[in-house]
Image: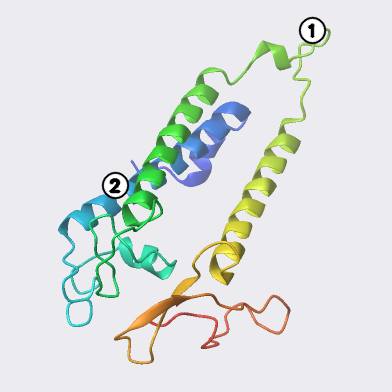
Amino acid sequence: MGLPWYRVHTVVLNDPGRLLAVHIMHTALVAGWAGSMALYELAVFDPSDPVLDPMWRQGMFVIPFMTRLGKTNSWGGWSITGGTITNPGIWSYEGVAGAHIVFSGLCFLAAIWHWVYWDLEIFCDERTGKPSLDLPKIFGIHLFLSGVACFGFGAFHVTGLYGPGIWVSDPYGLTGKVQSVNPAWGVEMPLFSYVKEAFPRH
């Protein structure tokens, strides 16, 4: 098909609800793919030898990213560190994958709702017939709040304030552990610097 991105956006340019709907649907597709792919990888992953047969050697793609974000336990009773566990908690590999699938379903329903009810009459001024809401302002506020939520999740999760931290490997990439990190919040850390303490090594 090969339509450029601006052609697709032009179709829904004057339909703010439908413009929102296609972006919510895209989020639903991405989250659904991530959750279902994680469940598939967990079904075929062999955790018996995490040192000589790690997950990346078995062709895993999604669960290494989950591990980097501090998820190390499975409802199957195994841990990526090689030990067995009895209580992995709800936020294990399977819990995070399931949460992505549930979030995908909710986004799918929200996208359908915004597509069908994109021009609600209750939001129009009866005297002029024009929308009484400042739609670009509302859209901008939602984008800003989404950005704050994503930044807040990363800041709280990585620093260990509310979350386990991230996976940090040893210099040889053989063993590792989940620990909180202290990011540099100021201007002393350039955007593309390769500070060893800032990036986990695998």
Asked if 132 appears above or below 197 in the picture, the reply is above
Asked if 154 appears above or below 144 in the picture, the reply is below
Asked if 60 appears above or below 28 in the picture, the reply is below
Measured from the top left, where is residue 117 in percent x and y? 56, 18
From the viewer's perspective, is 161 left or right of 166?
Answer: right
Residue that appears at 64% across and 15% down = 120
Asked if 70 appears above or below 115 in the picture, the reply is below
Q: Front-most of 186 and 29? A: 186
Image quarter hosting the C terminus: bottom left
Residue that appears at 53% across and 75% down = 180
Q: Residues within 10 Å of mark 2 (few under 14, many from 20)?
A: some
**Name of the residue lying farthest toward the right:** 127
Residue that appears at 29% across and 60% down = 86
Marks 2 and 1: CB-CB under 8 Å? Answer: no
Q: Circle 1 is placed at which residue position? A: 126
- Tell me which amino acid carries mark 2: Ser
From the viewer's perspective, is 2 left or right of 199?
Answer: left
Which quadrant would residue 83 be assigned to in this image?
bottom left
Q: Front-most of 103 and 129? A: 103
Question: How far is mark 2 from mark 1, CA to CA?
Answer: 46 Å
Measured from the top left, where is residue 16 in percent x and y? 62, 29
Q: Secondary structure at mark 2?
A: helix
All told, the count of numbered labels is 2
Whichever of labels 2 and 1 marks the residue nearer the N terminus, that label is 2
Which label sits on residue 36? 2
From the viewer's perspective, is 113 left or right of 61?
Answer: right
Q: Nearer the viewer, mark 2 or mark 1?
A: 2
Measured from the top left, where is residue 44 in percent x and y? 16, 58
- Tell me which amino acid carries mark 1: Glu
Q: Front-most of 11 and 179? A: 179
Q: Residues within 10 Å of mark 1 (few under 14, many from 20)?
A: few
